[in-house]
Amino acid sequence: MKVLVIGGGAREHALCRSLSLDPDVTSLFCAPGNAGIAEVAELHPVDAMDGAAVARLATELAVGLVVVGPEAPLVAGVADAVREAGIPCFGPSAEAAMLEGSKAFAKDVMATANVPTSRSYVCTTPQQIDDALDAFGAPYVVKDDALAAGKGVVVTDDLAAARAHALACGRVVIEEFLDGPEVSLFAVTDGRTVLPLQPAQDFKRALDNDEGPNTGGMGAYSPLPWADPKLVDEVLETVLQPTVDELRRRGTPFAGLLYAGLAITSRGVRVIEFNARFGDPETQVVLARLKTPLAGVLLAAAEGTLAGLLPLNWRDDAAVTVVVASHNYPDTPRTGDPILGLDEIAAQDGPDAYVLHAGTRLADGAVVSAGGRVLSVTGTGKSLAQARERAYAAVDRIRLDGAQHRTDIARRAAESEAEAGAGAGARSGAGADARA
């Protein structure tokens, strides 16, 4: 199979890395890609938002599968253009991708399908905004109704800041605040069958201890030692399958990657948001744990044959990803700085730790920064503590002027895992059921 991946971030590098390891993939292409993806795929320049150009490239390359990574091309209908050219495409139609493209549309789907989520108001006037903010009180949760590259959400106790963000959005969704830890759960679907992957947790705030502004994500880990073992089954039954069924009932079947952002609240699981594509940086840790070759799974979703797929196989290993960002991210990041130390990581840390490129490019043969989130450094290990140690050891080798990263990714989860292991050992030694 020849495969073309559309996009150029760390999510696409993670996809390309997994596809490059799949024995069924004979040729791998990426458009436009980045400096790291160039090491595992043949790059082609293309405007990822131009469906006709993407379909033309896929036809010229004679690929058997196109994988659209980012959300903006999906909402713009790129997957539709590829399918119209007769090429299987992993990614929902423009109509179905509105599940991410419009928060109000997603709320309507959830309400009809009885999917548990937060109470909310869709606001278009200053008076509606003031009434909604007053109704819910602090903390205020304000979401731009349209795509905003991960920066359209403000959660704050500051009424003035919440109101200012709402007024700047035009059409906005204001919600009640959901307590409890957050979980990201991906599911591959062909519009009928829903195949959930392993859950992960990401870190949205820029600074340690969940402080600072929201970002596209500063790190992630999987598995979640503190989560209920029945969580995936519960979310499949109450969230994922009902949503897919409702979209099919509306005549807009969703085939691709359905991402559910969840809050595990005191009242049970609640949906924070839906995305229509793999999340970044959660993809980096989820795919690091997937043993089943990726191409066949994505092709089955594209062709509507997921029901005949064998169950997915997963590695027992844990994975931790730490994002290295540019100076001044998430405001106006500085770009063009040389990135050193990548060869050292490849030579000394692989295969237990490796670098996935996000905002990078080649300049005169050297890798330089080209975006806010520059690199995703991923470590794997028998435990979260070991994966975390390996990831941060690799991060320490990177030399990028003004770079920043969080130092607490997966720290509490690793401590929880260690405590659970110690407790299980003590109970087992006392003759108790170690599963308790």
Image (spheres, grey):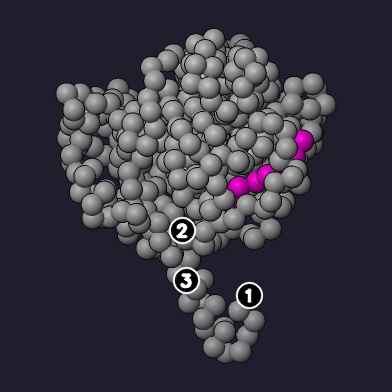
In the rendered structure, which amino acid carries the disc numbered 3? Glu
Mark 3 to mark 1: distance in Å?
Answer: 14 Å
- Report if the CB atoms under discs 3 and 1 are less than 8 Å apart: no
The secondary structure that dominates the magenta segment is loop
Q: x and y percent of residue 98 in the render?
A: 64, 21
Q: Residue furthest bottom?
A: 430
Q: Quadrant of the N terminus?
A: top right
Q: Is residue 434 magenta?
A: no
Which numbered disc, 2 or 3, marks the residue that appears first in the sequence? 2
- On the rendered structure, is 369 left or right of 67? left
Residue visible at 75% across and 22% down?
Answer: 252
In the rendered structure, which amino acid carries the disc numbered 1? Arg
- Report if the CB atoms under discs 2 and 3 are less than 8 Å apart: no
Q: Residues within 10 Å of mark 2 (few under 14, many from 20)?
A: many
Residue visible at 46% across and 33% down?
Answer: 27
> Does the rendering let one see residue 157?
no
Mark 2 to mark 3: distance in Å?
Answer: 16 Å
Residue carrying label 3:
419
Question: Which label sits in the foreground, 2 or 1?
Answer: 2
Mark 2 to mark 1: distance in Å?
Answer: 20 Å
Q: x and y percent of residue 116 in the render?
A: 73, 40
Labelled disc at residue 435: 1
- On the rendered structure, is 254 left or right of 38? right
Q: x and y percent of residue 404 in the render?
A: 26, 39
Labelled disc at residue 10: none
Residue carrying label 2:
318
